[in-house]
Image (tube, rainbow, N blue to C red):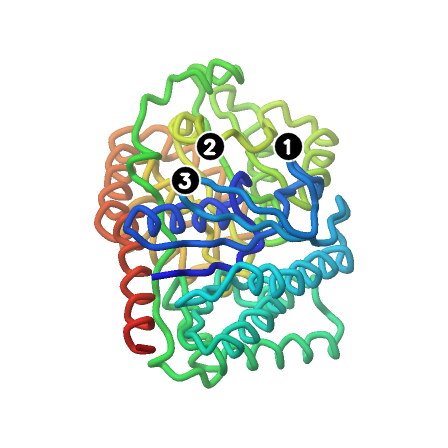
Amino acid sequence: MRILFLAQCYWPEEVSAAVLISELATDLVRHGHEVTVVTGAPSYPRGRVFPGYRNQIYGVERREGVRVVRVWSYLSPEKSFWPRILHYGTYSASAFYGGLFSGKPDVLVSYTPPLPLGISAWALSRLWGIPWTLEVEDLYPDAAVAIGALKNKRIIAFFSALERFIYKRASRIILISEGFRRNLLAKGVPDEKLAVIPVWADPDVIYPMSKENAFRARHGLDGKFVVMYAGNIGLTSCLEDVLAAAEVLRNESEVRFVIVGEGVKKDDLRAAAREKGLDNLLFLPFEPREVFAEMMAAADVNLVTLNPSSAQTSLPSKTFNIMASARPIVAVTPPGSEIAQLVESANCGINVPTEQPELLAQAILEIKNQPERLREMGNNGRSQLENHYSRAHCVSQSEQLLLSLHTKKK
């Protein structure tokens, strides 16, 4: 089967979406399929092209058997609304000719966001007469409206109409959670068009390790109780609660907060931490993938945070990396959110409501003195990951869905 992916991010970017798409594409090649990915020049998170790459009109490379076609898009280090829209829009347009020049596949797969990419995917699927699968990683424009990034009523109406257009025309829609399914059902999307395939982690790449390791030694964390957040530091991340909890615990000499990642809120958060004199909080950049497992293992507990407005429109993939590392989760989310339900059902961590940093600080102190409970919650998460959210399990589900579309088309 020949499969064409349209995906804004791909290897070597470390953003979770790029990692997951790279893993899916390479696994499909190992299973005997021909895979092409049409993507842009790697530039996340700084908006600048990685060394060794160019933001060119059309370029081709090979990576682990995957044919990677890179097309031009507008790039800027600015994180404001219009530069981001230009980036999404230009990539979405370039993906059409990138896909067209790549040759006709048997099945087409595109990812949203960005929403306009669905137009290119639909046009190619119509031109070639092939099935098109839409993978929804975040609910747009809902997510942008929820965090206040999108306020203009006309623009919201435009993107809502675009959303309805692509949902109606996709052959199948893959969602990452049951909450996403409920959202689309409420918008009138037929249930038979929807499939839920969760985000995954690779238990062979991220696995339990000793917490007293080289990562801790490099950053002066030996002997400390490490509370870690690793991921995008964006508008949905609710890390203000974490800073406030760090302020509450500033005199607890054994507790260290570590925030690893990049994003539009990082500079503001760092400035706030400096202003408060929080010596117990450390900001670090993204770590290379080859030391990711060691970094995750260095934590005593890992944070997953979502603000109330985003709790029903996002499901952070970091959750599954934490489970793979056999570390307990401290979920700072509203009660009833997807994350809160997962943590509770798997008994792999604790839930703390948002906007209650004193309660978060208290919860951290309590579990700090319960090593057996920490170990049990971590092991529960690892077991749940291996049984339901492993790379092999979820890739197999994706492959079977694509094969069924190909067979049906025949």
- Lateral position of residue 219 relative to residue 225, left or right: right
Instruction: Determine which of the numbered discs, if any, sits on residue 64 in the image.
Output: 3
Amino acid type indicated by mark 1: Gly
Marks 2/1 in contact by CB < 8 Å: the verdict is: no
Which disc, if any, is residue 52? 1
Whole-percent x and y of residue 139? 53, 67
Q: Which mark is residue 297?
A: none
Q: Secondary structure at mark 2?
A: helix
Q: Position of residue 375 (x, y in %)?
A: 26, 32
Is residue 347 in sight in this rendering?
Answer: no
Q: Earlier in the sequence, mark 2 or mark 1?
A: 1
Q: Nearer the viewer, residue 378 or 39?
A: 39
Provide residue 372's location: percent of width, then percent of height.
Answer: 24, 31
Callout 3 crowding tier (Cα within 10 Å): few <14, some 14–19, many ≥20: few
Identify the image quadrant of the N terminus.
Answer: bottom left
Which numbered disc covers residue 289?
2
Foreground residue among 295 and 254: 295
Spot occupied by residue 182 in the image (x, y as percentages of width and height): 41, 75
